[in-house]
Amino acid sequence: MSFAQTIVLGALAGFTIFLGLPVGRLQLLGSKARVALAMFAVGVLAFIFVDVMSNGLTIVDDALHAFKNDRQSLSYVIWLVVLLAAGFAACSAGLAMIERWMRPAKPPIAGGAETVAIRGTAESDPLGIELDAARRRALRVGLTIAAAIGVHNFAEGLAIGVSARAGAISLATVLIIGFALHNATEGFGIVGPLGDVKPSWRWIGLAGLIGGGPTFLGSIVGYAVTSDPLELAFYAVAGGAILYVIGEVWNGMRRYGHRELGLLMVSAGFIVGVLTDLIVTYGGG
């Protein structure tokens, strides 16, 4: 498979994420439907988390086995473990600290004319300010999900590029089909937690580029170069970010209730992730 064919098919696999994103503009969903969609997204994200971390641990395990057989140094194994831990922590606890820092500070009790104006606005329309803050937070969480999925999809693109460069055309084709189906469900994972917030088409376009674009980029990098530490770093970052996002979505949906439905949809999302991944496994990926 040529380089041009690889990047075209990598782009096709990545941008199927746009199939699920327009659901976020539907305004006919009640609280029950919102919980179902969001928790289905959590199920998909939970599967991606398991998939990402198992792939990362496989790289570390392979290095450890190589060390046991005197084919690798201990320092390299330690470096991989540190890389895995640091990447995971940076995008779990790190994202939480960044999110806290980005929250708007409450206006001070005393101050100049600007402070008085802010306080007056808050007192005149506190509900409007609260709703606007909730809307910005929901859209921010959605983009965080897109970024986490994008890191995961970069690793998927690496797999496409590596198999195509090696001449395993049948494997690369099955990987592309499997990742395309998988990425289509990831669009629901991005917009599900938005609840009743209606994103703009511009936001949907940005989220799609962030989430799906890395598959295209990964296929280019994978065709040109392979590196276990590079893959491991992306797996670690993706895993930490996905875990953070799952917690955010879960907490946000608790206010709607429908606990049993939510848990059922988590299971459904996880199973859909497994089924789409089986296509990749069947092809030898």
Image: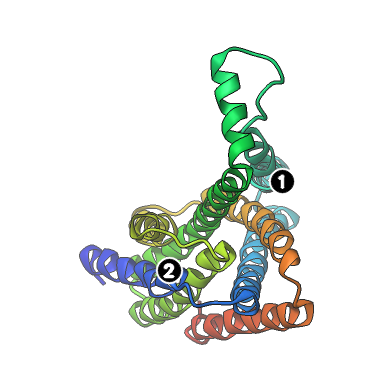
Q: Residue furthest top?
A: 112
Foreground: 191 or 69?
A: 191
Residue 202 makes an appearance in the image: yes
Foreground: 171 or 276?
A: 276
Task: Give the x, y percent position of residue 55.
Answer: 62, 64
Please tell me how crowded label 2 is: few (under 14), some (14-19), or many (20+) other residues with Cα within 10 Å.
some
Task: Give the x, y percent position of residue 57.
Answer: 69, 60
**Image depth: mark 1 or mark 2 in front:** 2
The amino acid beneath tag 2 is Arg
Cα separation, mark 1 vs mark 2, equals 37 Å
Foreground: 117 or 166?
A: 117
Q: How many marks?
A: 2
The amino acid beneath tag 1 is Ala
Residue behind mark 1: 85
Task: Give the x, y percent position of residue 211.
Answer: 44, 59
Residue 273 located left or right of residue 224: right
The answer to whether residue 252 is above or below residue 270 is above
The answer to whether residue 162 is above or below residue 79 is below
Residue behind mark 2: 25
- Badge 1 element: helix
The residue sitting at 69% across, 43% down in the picture is: 96
